[in-house]
Image (tube, rainbow, N blue to C red):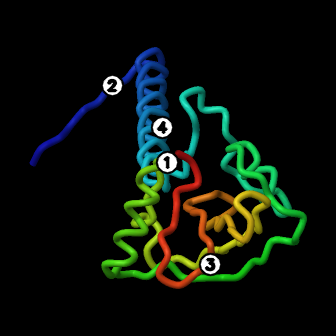
Amino acid sequence: MFVFNLKIKAKKTVILAAVLSVTAAIICTAVTVAINSRLPDTAVSDKTGEYSLVLNDGEEKKFLEQFGIETADAKPEKRSVVIPSDFNKYYEEYNELQKKIGLDLAKFKGKEVTEIMVPLEKPKDNNAVLLVYKNRVIGGHITNGEYGSKNLPLVD
């Protein structure tokens, strides 16, 4: 039979409690950082990082204008789309277009997103298409709307 006799003084108890509290705070911070690092990157910015990526309702034109894209007066069209869980060769090509501007749709596979089509003033008859997930722009392109035509990146 073993008997443990443990005598802890009040000073040691306070120190032990402080060490445990600091350890718990460090663990919570590490978990928070790990979770946030797995959140999708939705950053499209110039070298100064000044572009806004959060897109509140009705701010589509303002968002595009910060990239020098001239929008027409027509109202943007919105619809829900689902990013496929498995990318075919066309979606792989489209995702490569997104990667050129610092985005990656692979992080959103299987997610329902909002596609916003904004008519452009120049070039005429073209549209900017934005993909938005939880009010954050996750992708987009410029298109003339013709089937089989090449999409262009939002920014050069």
Please give the residue where the numbered disc 4 appears in the rendered image.
Answer: 29
- Residue occupying the far top of the picture: 11
| In the displayed structure image, the side of residue 155 where residue 7 appears, left or right | left
- Tell me the distance, in whole angstroms, between the alpha carbons under discs 3 and 4: 47 Å
The label nearer to you, 2 versus 3, is 3
Q: Earlier in the sequence, mark 3 or mark 4?
A: 4
In the rendered structure, which amino acid carries the disc numbered 4?
Thr
Q: Are marks 3 and 4 in contact (CB under 8 Å)?
A: no
Q: Residue drawn 61% across and 74% down? A: 113
- Name the residue tied to disc 2: 7
The residue lying at 44 percent from left, 33 percent from top is 26
Residue 57 image position (x, y, % from top left): 83, 63
Q: Which of marks 4 and 1 is nearer the N terminus?
A: 4
Give the number of the disc on residue 36: 1
Residue 37 or residue 7, whichever sits in front: 37
Residue marked by disc 3: 145
Which quadrant holds residue 104? bottom left
Q: Distance between the residues labelled 2 and 1?
A: 43 Å
